[in-house]
Amino acid sequence: MGKNLSDVRVKLNVEQPSVPVNMGNLAIFVKGETPKAETFSSYDDISGVYSENDSINQIASGYFAQADHGDKLFVFTYDNLNSVAETYYGEGWEFATVVGSDGANPDSEMTALSNYINGKDERFAITAYPATETTVSKAEEIRNRFGNARRTIVFVNGEDQSKAFYGLGALIGAVANELVGSVTWKFRKIGGVKPVNLTVTQIQKLHDANIFTYVTKAGINQTSEGKTIGGEYIDALHGDDWVKASIETELQKLLSSSKKLSFDAVGIAQIDATVTQVLSQATNNGIILENAETGMGKFAVTTVPREESPASDISSRQYTGLSFSYTRAGAIHSVVVSGQINL
């Protein structure tokens, strides 16, 4: 795991098929001689520092132009990408991209970031390419480069790389900071991004590679899909991240605010109640499926009593006996209607 200062670790396993840190913050990694982390809260702040890097400026411009953007945008300067990503893992970012110092889209470094994040199996790597015939022709090549990574997003938009970077920042700024669970990443309107000039066949070729773009449907500009390059729905994985981060945060609060959390039925019940509360909130947010009959979320929380806990856990004051499971709520992305005409 990355370097987070916490006494709680949540291991989340997904059965196939089947508040925490700001969940809409974006990090930009850029190559440099001296590793450092910088935090910006407005476009004016970042443009004054990186006026000569068009890619950073475009991403920041798109990000901060959206009404619901996250409260921070990070710029991490790296000499060794994996090392810097690990060092600043606890800074509070959920999405990350890599740009070149010359404004280019550095494929090899982006692949390295994708591999790093997918190794963690949390958070997202995101990159963007211009909506050109060249990009469409390389759609499968792009997917293969990232190895069908389940936590990597590829967004095709704009007529050149500069505008594509604007769209990347705008996508995260427009959607990522919405209440997690309440939105899907398909059908989303993004300020300042124009629909692409691609044919239906070309757009389908992008979709076949799990790459999405920006189109007009029924007179409304919107994202054409909402999947990662690995075919996972972004909102589903984002919801998993919210659950994990929320449980870690609330359990840490419980530990920090208790004079002593006893290793007995009372203490274990408090842990159970804390996790149950988070999963109930996840149900209300639309992350977890609601049982139509009971109105309760389709989740389960299981605890092991002290009597059945390993002696080593008791002596080391570490409780490992809680587990939980839930069913994702999902969303409707298309509708098929059957009709009949009577003559």
Image (spheres, rainbow, N blue to C red):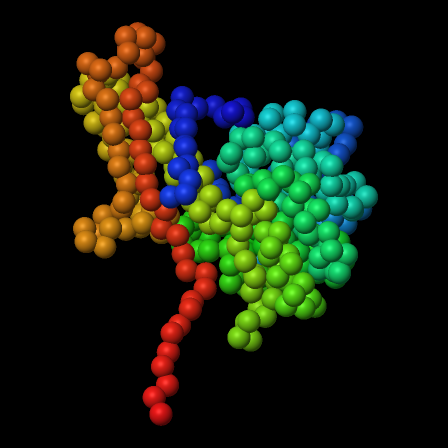
Q: Position of residue 7 (x, y in %)?
A: 40, 21
Give the quarter of the image for residue 32: top right
In the picture as drawn, the residue positioned furthest to the bottom comes out as: 343
The foreground one among 41 and 343 is 343
- Residue 100 relative to residue 321: left or right: right
Q: Is there any visible trace of residue 174 in the rendered image?
A: yes
Give the quarter of the image for residue 216: bottom right
| Residue displayed at 47% across by 44% down | 238
| Residue displayed at 21% across by 27% down | 269
| Residue displayed at 60% across by 26% down | 86
| Residue displayed at 56% across by 65% down | 222
Q: Where is residue 245 in the image (x, y as percent from the top left)?
A: 42, 35
The foreground one among 212 and 275 is 212
- Residue 49 relative to residue 263: left or right: right
Q: Is there any visible trace of residue 40 in the rendered image?
A: no
- Residue 162 in the image: above or below residue 99: below
- Residue 260 in the image: above or below residue 76: above
Q: In which quarter of the image is the C terminus?
A: bottom left
- Residue 235 in the image: above or below residue 247: below
Q: Where is residue 12 in the image (x, y as percent from the top left)?
A: 41, 32
- Residue 338 in the image: above or below residue 306: below
Q: Position of residue 37 (x, y in %)?
A: 65, 32
**Count of labels in the image:** 0
